[in-house]
Image: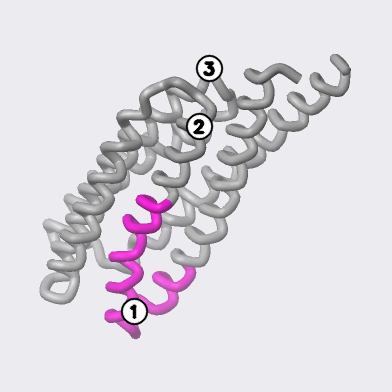
Amino acid sequence: MTTATLNEQLQVQSLRNLYFTRTVIQLLWAGVVLAEAVSNPALAAGFLIFYPLWDVVCTVYDLRTSTRYTSSTPTAQYVNVALGLLAAIGISVTVFKSPQQAVVAFGAWACAAGLAQLAAGISRRKQLGGQWAMILSGLQSTAAGVAFILGGLSGKTHIKDLGGYAIFGGVYFLIAGFLLHRKLSKIGAGVAAGA
């Protein structure tokens, strides 16, 4: 097995595992927010702050593993980390005073994070494949972010309405994880055939 093949295999494996982990956490997050946002606003507020921070943790993990195996510069991911931290601060400052403003802050972050995810998906498409779900997720996140901003500003979108956003994101990550799993199987079969 060549070094390039090994690096590709390790990067795909790391990304696949990250996508599956994100699926589980996002679906759990959505379940709690949908079930508890109305009856337990403090818990929902905490979960709203947690979401962009969780994205930051995942992006940092992705950065650490992907830069180990590739020479590309992941500028969009660095921007995403900074925006996630700013979003968590903005949400924590507003969520207990005005949940609608927190929804606007979340929407601004979702829009920007969607654009970053779109850029990362496009740049990884040729190298790793299996990124169409991440590209669609980035587009959906951007559109949802705009909708959250408009809904929050008009008072029509509430924290509980953000649960569906996480469900869609979880499904996209699940699909992308399976696509990368399939790619890993092909890499393994190619290595076995070449042995």
Mark 2 is on which residue type? Arg
Residue identified by numbered label 2: 68
Specify whether residue 98 is painted magenta.
no
Residue identified by numbered label 3: 126
Q: Alpha carbon of mark 1 to alpha carbon of mark 3: how far? A: 41 Å
User: Closer to us: mark 2 or mark 1?
Assistant: 2
Overall secondary structure of the magenta section: helix
Specify whether residue 49 is painted magenta.
yes
Please say if 89 is above or below 177: below
Mark 3 is on which residue type? Lys
| Residue 84: image location, x then y, percent | 27, 50
SS class of the residue under badge 2? helix
Quarter occupied by the C terminus: top right
Residue identified by numbered label 1: 43
| Residue 173: image location, x then y, percent | 53, 45
Region rendered in magenta: 31-57
